[in-house]
Amino acid sequence: MLVPTSHGLYCPQGDFFIDPRRSVARAVITHGHSDHAYRGMDAYLCTQETVPILRHRLGAHGHYHGVRYGETVVMNGVRVSFHPAGHVIGSAQVRLEYAGEVWVVSGDYKRQADPFAVSFEPVRCSTFITETTFGLPIYRWPSPSVVAAEINNWWRENAAAGRTSIIQAYSLGKAQRIMGMVDASIGPMMATSAVHAMNTVLADAGHALPPWKNLAAVDRNEPLTGSLVITTGIDAALLRRCKDAATASASGWMAIRGFRRRGNHDRGFVVSDHTDWPDLMRTIRETGAERILATHGSTSAVVRTLQEQGLQAAELEDVGMERTE
Amino acid sequence: MKHLSALYHALDATTKTGRKVDVLVKAFTSMPSDDVLWSIALLLGKRPRRICTTTELRQWATMAAQISPWLFDECYAAVGDLAETIAMLVHGGHTERQESLAATMASLEELRSTSDDVRAAAITSRWQTQTADDCLVFNKLLTGGFRVGVSRGLVVRALAVVFQADEATITHRLMGNWTPNTITLDQLMAADSVVADAAKPYPFCLASPLDAAPEHLGLVDEYRAEWKWDGIRAQLVHRGGRLYVWSRGEELITDRFPELDVLRGILPDPLVLDGELLAMDNTTVLPFAHLQKRISRRTISAAMVRAVPVRFMAYDVLEHGYDCRHLAYHERRRLLETIVEPLGASMPITISPTIQASEWSHLEDARQRARALGTEGLMLKRRDAPYQPGRTKGVWWKWKVEPYTVDAVMIYAQAGHGNRASQFTDYTFAIWKDGALVPFAKAYSGLTKAEIARVDAFVKANTKERFGPVRTVVPSMVFELAFEGLQRSARHKSGVAVRFPRIVRIRDDKTADQADSHQTILAMLDAHEQRT
């Protein structure tokens, strides 16, 4: 029902693409990250929550059609619906049903609690296309409350030492998740331009974000001591503005010491919006799928593991090469 | 354990040396004294013999994680550190029992004599009852690779603060063969700890490399020059009728050099000499490879001693009835002459000759001859300086001969370990021979972080084949390599073996076909052999 093409994942029966990379007529979008939602599609279908994000990122005048989680849209006889993926606000798995067969495309997803993204719901299907960004058993995320305590301690210690805390995070998803998981009583939260813009879009759409300040609007002479600055990138200008700063990044890759040390940040916190290994295995079981296609990251390790468990599994990209569908 | 784990991760979290010293001081003042002693020992690289092999650890972890062996290997390749891979795979999320480091070490010691099953069960259970952070440190105790970017110097600085003594004193107290099982922290740090241990050597005085013209150092009269010997730096300690030979790595290597035993009872007692162990055939210094055989063997046969006789090339005296390190170099030298010269040529000890010079140009001429004499260059020592521990700038200079250099092509790359995990940092280089590229040397060092990132990207984009962790790459990147000693070797495809190969720079101006050939190397070798 789905084949990988140079433009993206294509559904011939329904004549639409999922997260296409090049211009097509009809695009079904799992979530608003730039490697999933590209410019130049004639029409976009996504969740209601994703519409304002696409409008902000891809331009106000595109044709965006938003639907509720669970609502079904029929495209050339293919029944298409969106189900929570827990990755970022508005993120969805896409369920396709045609002639009694059900496929689910996971998009990016996580099973951990997120203060703003609706929690992942497993969807029964016969073929499950899953992301495997962190598809190795070394990836087992610590619980969010443990990481929140680590970030709070770090922020508190920096504040006590007269330093500014700078944390690097994606503007959509990670930034809001961090704002929602830390203890806002420690100090003010500041957002640099991209984070502030995204926060504004989400707050306007009705998401109850904790209070933050737009760093660009803060008087240049006002000291930032004790603040937590959330930014998409740390550059020399930002470090000068913060004077004495401690820097951190928040990502699943921070689970590995080598990455942490090479990252040039003082700290690395393990905060991932992707599924870890135990949740990946659990999710695959819960979908009841008899065939698993893996995409992104450690696809081969996941496929081989599933095959050893007696499941039918392949790397999604290979499926396209064979053209057997 | 929790103190050591906290210390390890606090040290790991910073690259600033000042901050590391603060962390060490805080740890040394807050830990129980047994844990302090163990922590010092581990930081100095003194570790007990392993109680299990890395193969066993892999097997047990693979079973505990309930995964296939190939998947363990995939994980190890992604992480690049065995202790960390295991910790990530099997940690239990929280640490259940808190015990002192000394207690952990003692219970590990008890496991040594138990069966495989008991050891496997005990280690696995510890893994599963610790956080990932604690588990990593625990595994570092098992694998012995307890490196956390803390030099001996930093440990000394911190202990100097804690015990309110100067760094030279602390350095001396830490020398020798002690283990946490043979000494207490109080004994180790006691003022008379040096007297109590007859075998204890002194901290070595180390030379700084001289990169500029020697004229910068001042007048030639203020220095004495000697050859820079290419052997094993060692201290000869003769006290209480016993002879001890210490390497610079603080390893007791007395039994590897049985021919030195004749000096016992003949040398003054107590006496400590600094010098170099050299393989010598009469007066000719033999290549370092001959000495290497001595270090790598556990037992040294009489035949080996006859085949490759070793002499101690003495160049300093540190104790002669009293600690004489405070004397000026020229005074110690005179003392050394009165000790060594009367012994005669039949004894396996020689005094390192001084190279006479009234102008710097004389020494520059001597340096040109250095390689032909089997030495690495010259040592320049300040006449009036006392013997100082560590690398004190301006006391001793090493003025090495220019290294050999060769332009070679990268053909294989392998990911590094630890800090360099998941990045291609270990390279094999080739030279041309009969129209094909043959492996010539491996090198890991010499590139900046940015250059490593560039080569890493090149390797990933130009991989031809994969053999486990090794990738063959399109042979197009040329590197200038520097190396020391050059020797014919039947074991190497290129026909030569080199010492200390390292990367000087990336030769973007050269293409693979412009790299050096086997003939170039042979010409170097011929020139070298003609001189000797």
Image: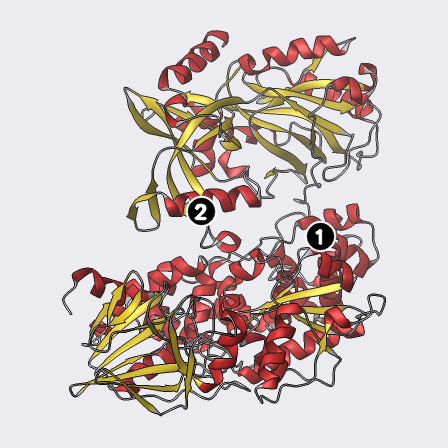
Decide: is B27 above or below B468. below
Circles 2 and 1 on the same chain: yes
Q: CA distance from mark 2 to mark 1?
A: 35 Å
Residue at 43% of width from left, 70% of height from top? A37
Task: Report the disc number at residue A208.
Answer: none
Crowding near the residue tagged with mark 1, few <14, some 14–19, many ≥20 C-alpha atoms within 10 Å: some
Chain holding disc 1: B
Return the residue nearer the eye: A152 or B141: A152
Mark 2 lies on residue: B457
Disc 1 residue type (three-letter):
Leu
Q: Position of residue B196 (x, y in %)?
A: 72, 51
Decide: is B379 above or below A135. above
Left or right of B324, for residue A299 = left
Q: Position of residue B75 (x, y in %)?
A: 38, 63
Disc 2 residue type (three-letter):
Ala
Residue situated furthest front in the rendering = A61
Mark 1 lies on residue: B154
